[in-house]
């Protein structure tokens, strides 16, 4: 008997994406979410390529509930490559997650040539940064190309007000001004 979560089982579950019945699709996504392994995340990433909007939406929610770095990276990819509604949902999911583990990847997306992609990445970074109480994360965000992200970082560091936060602000200011 095969165990649930094996590559073979995940491959079988993924066949549910092709079913016309949305309930079957939803149950396939929920099964992969419960498994939560890298293979399951890969399966959910594949679901994001399907043309069905509702399948993409529930896959994004599932990736947000898995709450691993690998799942978050899938959501970051969605910000780069999907339509506006899907991109916004991925951004909201990452923002609610509030973890800074994909900070570098999001800061890289700020350089994307497409304005809507840049804006979505900036909004997501602002949400993550504003939820962070980690001074090193906030100091790192001061180097973002987005003015909004830098502003939120400065405000958060100012509110924290510890010597480490003030020191980070001063170092960033001296770097920017060339002092």
Image (cartoon, rainbow, N blue to C red):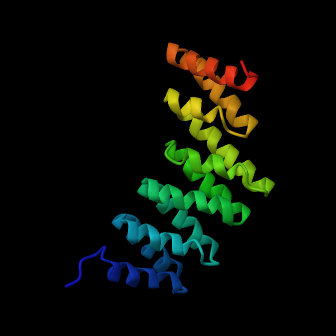
32 vs 155: above or below: below
Please provide percent x and percent y for residue 71: 47, 59
Please provide percent x and percent y for residue 125: 63, 42
User: Residue at the location (57% across, 46% down)?
Assistant: 104
Numbered label tally: 0
Q: Name the side, left or right, on which 27 lies relative to 51.
A: left
Please provide percent x and percent y for residue 148: 73, 35
68 vs 1: above or below: above
The quarter in which the N terminus is drawn is bottom left
Please provide percent x and percent y for residue 6: 30, 77
User: Residue at the location (46% across, 74% down)?
Assistant: 43
User: Residue at the location (66% across, 35% down)?
Assistant: 143
Residue 36 sits in quarter: bottom left
90 vs 97: above or below: below
Q: Name the side, left or right, on which 150 lies relative to 156.
A: right
The quarter in which the C terminus is drawn is top right
Q: Is residue 95 in view? A: no
Q: Residue furthest left?
A: 1
Q: Name the side, left or right, on which 2 lies relative to 76.
A: left
User: Residue at the location (53% across, 62% down)?
Assistant: 74
Q: Nearer the viewer, residue 99 or 112?
A: 112
Q: Nearer the viewer, residue 145 or 125?
A: 145
Q: Name the side, left or right, on which 90 lies relative to 119.
A: left
Q: Is residue 124 in view? A: yes
């Amino acid at each position: 008997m095969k165990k649930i979560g094996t590559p073979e089982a995940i491959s079988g579950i993924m066949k549910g994406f092709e079913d016309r019945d949305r309930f079957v699709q939803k149950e396939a996504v929920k099964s992969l979410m419960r498994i939560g392994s890298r293979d399951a995340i890969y399966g959910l990433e594949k679901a994001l390529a399907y043309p069905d909007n509702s399948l993409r939406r529930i896959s994004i929610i599932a990736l947000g509930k898995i709450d691993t770095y690998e799942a978050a990276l899938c959501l970051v990819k969605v910000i780069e490559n999907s339509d506006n509604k899907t991109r916004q949902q991925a951004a909201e999911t990452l923002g609610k997650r509030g973890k800074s583990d994909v900070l570098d990847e999001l800061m890289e997306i700020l350089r994307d040539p497409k304005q809507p992609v840049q804006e979505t990445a900036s909004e997501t970074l602002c949400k993550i940064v504003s939820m962070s109480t980690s001074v090193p994360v906030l100091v790192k965000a001061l180097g973002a190309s987005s003015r909004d992200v830098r502003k939120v970082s400065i405000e958060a560091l100012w509110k924290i007000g510890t010597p480490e936060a003030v020191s980070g602000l001063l170092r960033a200011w001296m770097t920017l001004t060339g002092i």
